[in-house]
Amino acid sequence: MKRLLILIFAVAMLAPRLRADEGMWIPMLIGKNIDDMRKNGFKLTAEDLYSLNGNSLKDAIVLFGRGCTGELISNQGLLITNYHCGYSPIQALSSVEHDYLSNGFWAANKSEELPCQGLSVKFLVRMEDVTERVLREVPRGSAESVRLKLVNKASQELIDAVQKEGVVYTAQVKPLYYGNQYYLYVYQEFTDVRLVGTPPESIGKFGGDTDNWVWPRHTGDFSMFRIYANAKNEPADYSPSNVPYTPKRFLKISTQEVKENDFTLVYGFPGTTRQFITSDAVDLLVQQSNQHKINLRNIRLSIFDRYMSQNDTIRIRYASKHASVANAWKKWIGETIGLNRLNAAALKREQETMFQSWAESNSERRSRYAALLPAMHSLHQQLTPLSLVYDYRQEAINAVEMLQLASRLDALVYKSLNPATKADEMKRLRERAKRSVRQFYKDYSFNVDVEVCAAMLSTYAAQIPTEFHPDVLMQVEQHCKTPDDWMRFAVELYSQSVFADTLGIMTLLSDFDSTTAKHLLTDPVYRLHRDFEAMFEPKVVRPYYGIQDSLQLLYRGYVAGLMELHSDKNFYPDANLTLRITYGRVKGFEPKDGVVYAPFTTLDGVAEKAAMLDVSDYRVPARLLELHKNKDYGPYAVNGKIPVAFIAANHTTGGNSGSPILNAEGHLIGLNFDRCWESTMSDVMYDPNYCRNISLDIRYVLFIIDKYAQAGYLLSEMEIVN
Ligand code: ARG
Ligand code: GLU
């Protein structure tokens, strides 16, 4: 009895109790949270957020491109998202004559708007819990492979049924809680999306990598697009005869003062979180994966930095590569510090001990749950060494650009050696390879890559057990003792390869056939790539995914058990790039001893940073500083200052970029674009004291459009409320 009491007490204490502000909620089920939201100041209803009547806030929100969020802000299909989300289409439209990156772009009227090839946006039409349907035919206790087949079959039937509805929808079925539940998502996808306006990079990316993930922040991170539809207001590929799309709903914009403790809600498409992972998985992440990945990127970034600071051509060519390598690198560092500070692995271990006692407390539970954690633990012991090699494959070997280029020719080589391949397919593959190679060299530096190659191979050789060294590497190692040796090797490797000869490789591709393929197989770079892959595939990749699959299955049971154990708790599934709601309040915090972060920044801070003349990330257009100096703020100032960004306790992650941040009335007050560095562990464990998302204040957007760009005519189609 006493033991039982202790157990009950401990379970209550250690329940992964809902920490304030934590949660990425399913819109369809938001009714469960609405009381809590109203207590925090929210004024609308669950129906206002999500309803099938075609007029709820969800109808104003889109999945923008492959992994961002955007929202409609006029009844003529005008859409706003982050600058960094629009960056790649903006870059693609830019040229030396039309340098939109440096100068920005503002269409003076609809005919000037620029079609963006390959860009699409998706509205969520509806979501449905289809768990019962998907699992109906799966016999209890069936093997995972059998289950998967039946799940896929049922999912396909659901998707086909959507297609038969007559409207052009796309649909997908996704697992939640590791396959304890399944949801059907129905989307309407628009493919004619045009650039309407963007500030110059110096505003849209102000602070660059220096400020990335960091508060206080002063980035004008927005760009605007317009969705076009056919005459029936339906999706259509680009055509000059398309017309602006009339959305079911668009967001009203509030210019009211945002104050500390105000209610905020973020509505968007968070990508990936892993809140349920076990203590072993946290240890693997913090003590091994992140450490090695950070170190490998340190090496790579320092090579990039050295060349970029010495050579302007390389600086431009590697700008985007540097930004993306640095983005995850900086996040991993913040995440590692955050998880350590939280003692995340130890907390998880306590919860697991508790779970285990609960699971062993009666025979029914014992049969369902008691074996899970021990099995996961032993799988982790197998996973850890494999995971190290897996990470080096991604972050060392695939970091060598020349080896990446080689891998892009695999399909072509493979197909050309197969006599059954048809001539037109060969032609298509040749053209694709040529395009890919041309693109590769556009932003490539031989000198940078040779150094990266030498550094990555030598680090691989030093850190990875020899059983994972392909023969070529073994041979090289015998001669390479110092960094100079590795460098000499890399230079020789490249100089003997056809890949280092742009003209040569293009000629080779022009009439690529089985003879050239055989010839390529003897190329030193291509061989190095093949030898690594021939080893990785059977010895690393396959067993790694095999273990991951087994773990998924065990997690399914573990999470089901957690939900049973804490049946009074309102759970939310991990982010999976589907529409979610998260809410909290505008709030500063104490990132470290002796430092307090205020929740707001203003244009004064842009000028302060711009005065630090040695930081190139802080260069801004003179015109912006001029407006600041003259306090030429129009109606957008609050207490004599232009608000720029603010932080709030909303649980967000990658994919939430561009998401609307709404006030208690459901009006747009800003755009989510980042998290604070101290917050980045929230993908694994949320901490209300440290987790803050960073949003661009909508009044800075209006100020930039109106006063800076003098494109105030765009405001006339928005609905601005006070
Ligand atoms: N950290 C933000 C995100 O995770 C912004 C990244 C783009 N900006 C940059 N300076 N790299 O995507
Ligand atoms: N910048 C991120 C994005 O592109 C959002 C930052 C985060 O991970 O919270 O989605």
Image (cartoon, helix red, strand yellow):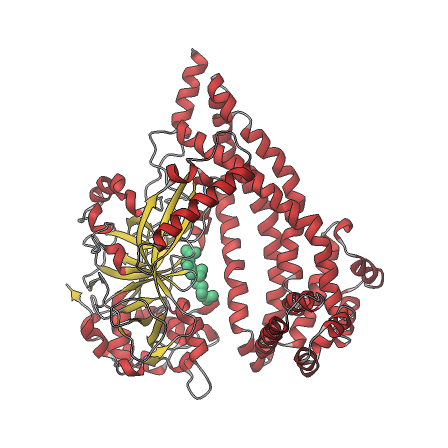
Image quadrant where one finds the N terminus: top left
- At 40% from the left edge and 34% from the top edge, which residue is drawn? 16
Pick the residue in front: 88 or 243: 243
Q: Residue furthest top?
A: 1
- At 38% from the left edge and 60% from the top edge, which residue is drawn? 657
**Percent coordinates x, y for residue 348 in the rendering:** 49, 35
**Percent coordinates x, y for residue 303 in the rendering:** 63, 69
Q: Residue furthest left?
A: 722
Image quadrant where one finds the C terminus: bottom left
Toward which corner of the image does residue 225 lie, by quadrant? Answer: bottom left
Up/down of 124 relative to 636, above or below: above
Is any atom of residue 339 visible in this view? yes
Q: Residue furthest bottom?
A: 97
Up/down of 80 relative to 240, above or below: above
**Percent coordinates x, y for residue 456 in the rendering:** 69, 62
Number of numbered tags placed on the structure image: 0
Up/down of 348 relative to 436, above or below: above
Toward which corner of the image does residue 205 lie, by quadrant? Answer: bottom left
Pick the residue in front: 286 or 578: 578
Horizontal side of residue 446 vs 285, given as left or right: right
**Percent coordinates x, y for residue 294 in the rendering:** 59, 56
Horizontal side of residue 290 vs 666, given as left or right: right
Pick the residue in front: 289 or 311: 289
Which quarter holds ligand 2?
Answer: bottom left
Is any atom of residue 213 visible in this view? no
